[in-house]
Amino acid sequence: MISFKMPSLGADMEDGTLVEWRKQPGDLLQRGDILADVDTQKGLIEIEFFGEGVLEKQLVEEGQKVPVGTVLALIRPVGAEAEQVVPPAAAPEPKKEAIPMEPILQEEKPASPPVATEKTKRIKISPLARKMAEMHQMDISQIKGTGPEGAIVKADIEKRLAEIVPEKEVVEKPREVLQQAPVQQAAIPESEAIRKAVAAAMSRSNQDIPHYYLEKRMDMSKALAWLKEANKERSVQQRLLPVALFIKAVAKALDDVPDLNAVWENGLQRKNEINIGFVVSLRTGGIMVPAILNADTLSMDAVMACLNDIIPRARAFKLRSSELSQSTFTITSIGEGGGDKVFGVIYPPQVGIVGFGEIRDEAVVHEGMIGIKPVVDVTLAADHRATDGLIGGKFLAALNKYLQNPASL
Amino acid sequence: MNEATIKTTIFQLLKRIAPENDPSTLMPDENIREALNIDSFDALQFIVAISEKLNVDIPEEDYGKTATLKSLMAYLQQKIKH
């Protein structure tokens, strides 16, 4: 049996509120399926499952806030027999949870007469919808479900309520049970929450990580010429930005210098996948760092398509768990328009961050002559527990090599 | 398409990208990106939106002509005429 836990979506996340189950017990789960929506400081996140199996049991109710690491659900791997793994009916499941269920929730199920259980079993309904239905004493057999496999979901209950209950009552505050679960909607996190999340992660980084810094000025004339040619052939919707080139070049350089594509957790642990976290600044203040997964294997157009998809979603707080939790290295290009260079703060437990300043024309010495060329100042901040300056220098050299040969990307 | 319609379209699209700002306060010669704090990604989205909405093709080498309200208006009017 697989214990599916509340994931950590970054060093700054302590807990999350399960807002809605997107899969119900008995549902077959495929790799990448979205299991639930969880509300965090970083918005409403779709939590994905990267295995295969059947959802056996949900252990956390919709609306519950639980710490990172709490088992949310049990998943039976494909091939395992249901009988072997079903826990006895009397098993005190709440004990498995880091935070005990509220007493009122515990009582609910055993208190229901068996007949009612029989009846509700036949009708597929999400736990939140069931709670709402019970609260309003609705007959769920009269409701047509619009969820997966015809399951009744919150929206169906709301629709039904709007039909049968005068408006005033709908707006009425929910009773005790639901008050414990204030987060029902895709609440956009307050900028204060984002600020706190950034503050927590960056403080931890500064306290724990002995940063070292390297800087290299890179000639961008070849890269920009290549981009110009590439964009001539592309419609305006498909044009590439220099940042797509930076992301691809960084991913390739990490492939050459794998010690920087790693995390520091009781020692250096290299990561197999190269997932580039990309700092997106929010207009209301704060940052989000979604990951471009397997960036080394993507074409430049695919990287750009990924940015076109992920940046608006990051700004709307609509990211998936893998995009927030699986980055292995970070890029910041906040220097653009603002600073000639940016010295990053590492996002723990990663061991490095590369910063791209603004691309600008500078006097450059080349083969004994002074010329004007577009350049970018690239900085690397790296964890000195994990690597030394020699590795950092190799990385910047590799990065420069790729930027001087953009066609190879 | 007259000048006022083009201007309204530009303001609508800028408002969508930078909702907390009021684009109508832009001075004709002010750099739009700097004034409204628009990064390169959003700048590209703006060009995409303008070209789709007004049905004009804006090649990359003309991006410089879209920097201020005045130059952008002049550029688009000339593009639409042709």
Image (cartoon, coloured by chain):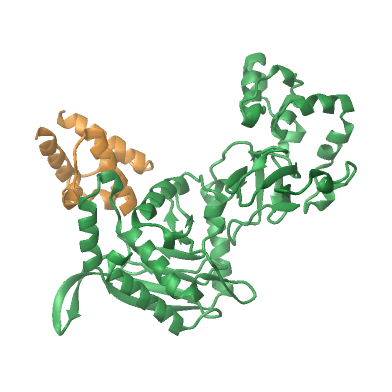
Q: In which quarter of the image is residue A409?
A: bottom left
Residue appearing at x 73%, y 53% in the figure: A3
Colour in which the image shows chain A: green
Q: Colour of chain B?
A: orange
Q: Could you tell me how many numbered marks the image carries?
A: 0
Relative side of B60 to A381, left or right: left
The percent coordinates of residue A349 (x first, y second) are 57, 68
Residue A397 in the image, given as x and y percentages of width and height: 35, 78
The residue at the point 84 percent across, 40 percent down is A106
Q: Is residue A82 above or below residue A290?
A: above
Q: Quadrant of residue A187?
A: top right
Q: Which residue lies furthest to the front in this view?
A: A79
- Lateral position of residue A29 relative to residue B58, left or right: right
- Residue plotted at (63% across, 15% down): A163
x and y, in percent, of residue A208 in the image: 59, 74
Q: Residue at x 59, y 62 (%)?
A: A11
